[in-house]
Image (cartoon, rainbow, N blue to C red):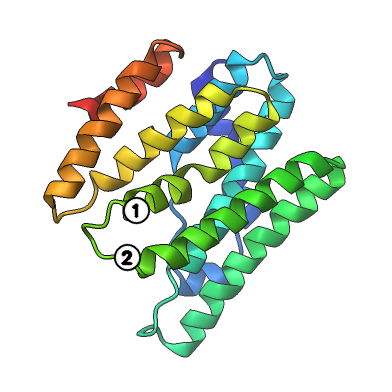
């Protein structure tokens, strides 16, 4: 099974797991970040993790990511019913993740992902307290965007992949932002240099998928 087939299998599995006819009527369809799936699968393939286990790891990680992203969508302007459903949907995805890994008896990975969730939530709070030009803001973004991937890399002893995830997904998020301060431009250049330095360690499919970020 090549990586595109693996990605499709994970994506389909997620869509099936989170499908809920009532919730789906009131909140926007979930966006599944295929870049994260691709990166994680490439990392696990490089460390020769058995395919079935790799697919399980990425499935669990993406359920957490969906839960975090869904909770981020909660807005004070939402109608109360929609707001409650968005919160509950995020909780549902979290529950699916815990149930799945508990059935696998994978306590070590549960612990690592729990650490990632804690890091992400701390940095989200910190991010709200910082000005757009504060350099510390970029570290917050790096942690938020990469913590799950970094913890997964630690789990499979592929720490250099965790470092790449930090800079690569920081770069991806920063490039989506419309306002470009000097601090942001400088940090973007820094991330590009770090990614270029780290790319030589990794599979061609990773370079091919993310090369547009370096343009």
Front one among 157 and 129: 129
Query: Counting other residues with Cα less than 10 Å from the Cα at mark 2, is it few (<14), some (14-19), or many (20 or more)?
Result: some
In the picture of the structure, the residue carrying the numbered disc 2 is 130
Q: Position of residue 162 (x, y in %)?
A: 52, 31
Front one among 119 and 88: 119
Query: Counting other residues with Cα less than 10 Å from the Cα at mark 1, is it few (<14), some (14-19), or many (20 or more)?
Result: few
Q: How many marks?
A: 2
In the picture of the structure, the residue carrying the numbered disc 1 is 136
Do labels 1 and 2 touch, CB within 8 Å? Answer: yes
Horizontal side of residue 42 vs 141, given as left or right = right
Front one among 73 and 158: 158
* Residue at x 52%, y 20% (from the top left corner): 3
Horizontal side of residue 191 vs 115, given as left or right = left
- Mark 2 element type: loop
* Residue at x 43%, y 37% (from the top left corner): 166
* Residue at x 23%, y 43% (from the top left corner): 175
The quarter of the rendered structure image containing the N terminus is top right
* Residue at x 57%, y 43% (from the top left corner): 148
Horizontal side of residue 86 vs 172, given as left or right = right
Which of the 4 quarters of the picture holds residue 112? top right
168 relative to 148, above or below: above
Residue 11 shows in the view: no
Q: Position of residue 185 (x, y in %)?
A: 16, 42
């Amino acid at each position: 099974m090549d990586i595109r087939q693996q990605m499709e299998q994970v994506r389909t599995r997620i869509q099936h797991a989170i499908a809920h006819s009532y919730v789906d009527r009131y909140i926007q369809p979930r966006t599944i970040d295929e870049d994260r799936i691709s990166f994680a699968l490439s990392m696990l393939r490089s460390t020769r993790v058995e395919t079935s286990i790799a697919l399980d790891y990425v499935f669990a990680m993406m359920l957490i990511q969906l839960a975090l992203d869904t909770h981020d969508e909660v807005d004070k302007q939402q109608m109360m019913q929609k707001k409650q459903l968005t919160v509950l949907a995020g909780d549902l995805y979290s529950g699916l993740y815990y149930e799945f890994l508990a059935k696998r008896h994978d306590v070590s990975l549960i612990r690592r992902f729990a650490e990632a969730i804690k890091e992400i939530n701390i940095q989200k709070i910190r991010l709200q307290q910082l000005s757009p030009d504060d350099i510390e803001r970029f570290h917050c973004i790096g942690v938020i965007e990469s913590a799950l991937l970094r913890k997964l890399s630690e789990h499979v002893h592929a720490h250099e992949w965790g470092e790449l995830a930090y800079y690569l997904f920081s770069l991806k998020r920063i490039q989506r932002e419309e306002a470009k301060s000097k601090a942001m431009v400088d940090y973007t250049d820094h991330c590009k240099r770090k990614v270029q330095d780290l790319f030589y360690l990794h599979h061609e499919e990773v370079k091919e998928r993310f090369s547009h970020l370096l343009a």
